[in-house]
Every structure is written in structure tokens, then in C-alpha cells.
Image: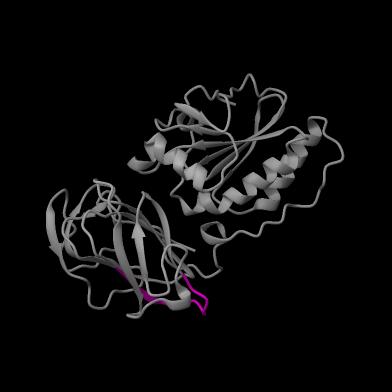
Amino acid sequence: MPDLDGALAWLNSTPLSSKSLRGKVVLINFWTYSCINSLRELPYLQAWAAKYKDAGLVVIGVHAPEFGFEKERANVENAVRELNVVLPVAIDSNHTIWQAFRNEYWPADYFIDGKGRIRHHHFGEGDYEESERVIQELLRENGATSLNAGPVRISAQGVEAPPSEDVQSPETYAGYDRAERFGSGEQLGHDSRRTYSLPLAPALNEWGLAGLWNAGPEHSALEAAPGKVVFRFHARDLHMVLGPAKNGRPIRFKITLDGAAPGDDHGVDSGPDGSGEVREPRLYQLIRQKRRVQDRTFVIEFLDPGVEVFSFTFG
């Protein structure tokens, strides 16, 4: 197990190290707070930490950012508080611990025995019962007895709820470094103000912009209001990673699904009439459908300038 001394700070704990953790079974989880896959795994991590604490398990979240705003300690602290994360969290904004583990994924779990050896790893969400069996095996090897062998049962809500079984839309980025399937008639610019128009009939998994935008490497920013974004998707849930204006003022928005207000299909961050606000940089759940999953056209209109659009994810 590499050491954890690359952390810039620790939340919910004094600094931990491989030496201080020797004799414990350790689960290192690499996550970042705007990643839907990380958020959906979080309830399991916290449940395992609580269930097996007395048996000698320590679960540590290493927060390694994907986007620039996730490097800021205040944003991480706010997310940890709002998500009710009680695990020790190492702030790895420079990816020092990430590189020491030679990690490449969010989320990623590394299972370490009482002698400090990495015995198992798992990349991505899912396979939770298998991961819990690994935890139990390592705890028994470490001398734990009378373990409850039954897996934890999770009933998560909001963004932490499991994905549906019918997701046909991939994670999609709105910055030019990783943008794909851009459907506006104009080519996506590079660090320049440009006026875009929505595609009239976007194909499945195609997206586009309308209004005056400035596309940067990791996000597109609205230069003047109003401005729109469209995405033709196939999934139960639609999320967007959004940030407010640089001056910190909230950004009002209105969403539609196939041209109408979402009604009961709204997400936790939008109302039945489609209204909502961007107040902080994070993942926003905008659609959670109650009906049968099918191809739908999503449009979000921002009523104030300055919003930053980073990505779309689905569930």
C-alpha cells in the first residue's frame, strides 16, 4: 500500500498513513464529488464502514478531482457536508495519492489486508456483494470473528439511487477537449465567443447549444442570456455537472422534456414546472422518469449569463 502523505488536507479525521493503519483492513476509495458513479457507490462505502468498524475495517475516501472546481478545498468540504459523508476523506487535489496507486478510474476501490498488502481492487460501481465478501475474508484473516455474513441492504434516494437497467446514453462532455456528438450547425469553437443554434432534430445521444457561448477545454460558458442546451437521450435519469457564474450569483434555468414541463419526471434539482437554480458547482439531477424509458429530447434554458456546463451523465 502506498503512503497517503500526498494529501493536502484531511476531513473527518486526523492524517492517516500506511504505518498508522498497519493491523487494520483498509478500503481505499478514489472518488470525486461530481461523478455520478462515485455518488451511487457512496451509500455502500458508508454502510461497510459502520458495519465492520468494530471488526477492524477502515474505509478512506481519497478525493481526486476530475474538474478544476473540485480542486478547491471549500467546494470539497461543502460537498462532504451536503452528502453527509462521515468517512475520513483525504483531499488529493494534486493527484499525488492517485499516482502513487497508479489509479486511472472513478470510482476505484483498493482492498488492503492487515499487513499492508493490496489484495484486491475493483474499478467502477457495482459488484457490491463481491466487494463485501472480500472485506469479510480479509477481516477473518486478520482475526475477526462473529461477522454478520449477510450483505448490507441499501435503500438510496436521489442521485445515490442505483441506475436503471436501460441506459443507452454515455457520459458526454461539453468542453472541447473531450466533446463528442456535437449537433449544432456550427462547429464547437475553442476559447472564443460564438453564436450557436440548436439542431432541429437531434439524433440519439447528440447534443447542441443555442445562444452565445464560449467553449473551453473542460466546459462551455454562456456569455449572454438566454442560452439553451439540448440532448437526445435514452435513460431514466439525466444529470448535468454545472457551475454558477464567476461572480457567484445563482443562475436560473427552465427545463423541458419533449417540449413540455417534466411534471412528475423532474429530478431532485428541478421542479415539476422545470424550474431550478445553479448555485454551486456540482452534479445536478434534472430528470428522473417515472414512466417507461424511451428516447426523449431534453432542453435546458438558462435565464442568466455565466453558467458553466461541464458534462452530462445518465442513470
- Where is residue 158? Give x, y as percent: 53, 61
Instruction: Say how many tags the image has.
Output: 0
In the picture, measured across the screen, residue 21 lies left or right of residue 221, that is: right
Residue at left 83%, top 30%?
A: 143
Q: Is residue 294 visible?
A: no
Farthest residue to the right: give it: 146
User: Which region shows up in magenta?
Assistant: 288-300
Residue at left 21%, top 71%?
A: 198
Q: Is residue 279 above or below residue 89?
A: below
Q: Quadrant of the N terminus?
A: top right
In which quadrant of the rendered view does residue 262 lie?
Answer: bottom left
Q: Is residue 305 magenta?
A: no
Q: Is residue 272 above or below residue 88?
A: below
- Where is residue 155? Give x, y as percent: 65, 60
In which quadrant of the rendered view does residue 19 lie?
Answer: top right
Residue at left 45%, top 37%?
A: 64
Farthest residue to the top: give it: 19
- Where is residue 308? Give x, y as percent: 27, 53
Q: Is residue 226 above or below residue 263?
A: above
In which quadrant of the rendered view does residue 208 lie?
Answer: bottom left
Q: Is residue 289 magenta?
A: yes
Q: Is residue 49 above or below residue 114?
A: below
Question: What's the coloring here?
Answer: one colour
Residue 303 versus residue 227: which sits nearer the camera? Answer: 303
Q: Is residue 314 visible?
A: yes
- Where is residue 106? Give x, y as percent: 49, 45
